[in-house]
Amino acid sequence: MKVTKANQTERDGIHTAGKIFTANSFIFREQSIIDLGIDAHAELVSDERGTGQLFGLQIKAGQSYLSEQSGEAYVFRTDKEHVDYWINHALPVLICLCDIDQEIVYWQFVGTETCLSTGKGHKILVPKQQQINQEALRTLGDLLTPLISVEEYTVFRTEDNSHNQAKRYSFDIVLNQ
């Protein structure tokens, strides 16, 4: 069986991203089973502890992903199906473009404001200054959903409002502070 250059570049990208995320206060977990557009997860680490706050990562590697540029950004092209999947994902999703030769990961948050329709598909501009490094941690942290400790709230009533196949629940919650 033949191993192609594309196969090796893809693996190099995963390894490069893992190395860079791990060096910059994240736990990196490759999604190796049934990849549907999320190649890995990155969990923020604070005070040497996992926070439970994660990103879904779509990782692309190789010079072909860095060849199209618009001003100070790389242009990542994709289809509507992937955009819809990422925008509706339970986790915030980052597009990560890996320069495996320079060991740099450029990133962009996937959201309705960053996914631009081209008529035939979508493009996402990935700024060259947005690199996974220590300087990016505050910005990346702001994109994560804040976690609230269970000591900070009390659930005092739950109600099942389901109708047929549509499952709906409501909760009345009191903040303890």
Image: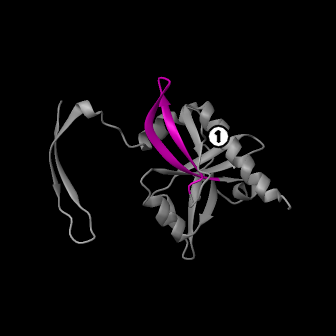
Does residue 30 show up?
Answer: yes
Report x, y in % for residue 67.
Answer: 73, 58
Q: Residue at x 71, y 54 (%)?
A: 66
Closer to us: 101 or 74: 101
On the picture, is 76 further left or further right than 113? right
- Residue type at numbered disc 1: Gly
**In the figure, is residue 36 to the left or right of 104?**
left
Q: Residue 144, image x and y in percent?
A: 42, 42
Would you place residue 107 above or below residue 65 in this image?
Answer: above
Residue located beneath label 1 in the image: 18
In this view, 58 is above or below 22: below
Residue depicted at x 50% and y 38%? 43
Q: Position of residue 56 (x, y in %)?
A: 52, 50
Foreground of the two, 164 or 63: 164
* Residue that lies at the very extreme toward the top in this rendered image: 47
What span is colored magenta in the figure? 38-59
Establish if 142 lies above or below 66.
Answer: above
Q: Does residue 41 belong to the magenta stretch?
A: yes
Residue pictured at 65% horizontal, 44% vertical: 105
Asked whether the viewer can see residue 130, the reply is no
Quadrant in which the N terminus appears:
bottom right
Disc 1 is placed on an element classified as helix
Classify residue 122 by image quadrant: bottom right
Q: Where the C terminus falls, by quadrant?
A: top left
- Near mark 1 (Cα within 10 A), the count class, few <14, some 14-19 or many ≥20, is many
Kindly give the residue lying farthest to the bottom in the view shown.
120
The structure residue drawn at horizontal position 50% and vertical position 24%, both measured from the top left corner, is 48
Q: Position of residue 163 (x, y in %)?
A: 20, 69
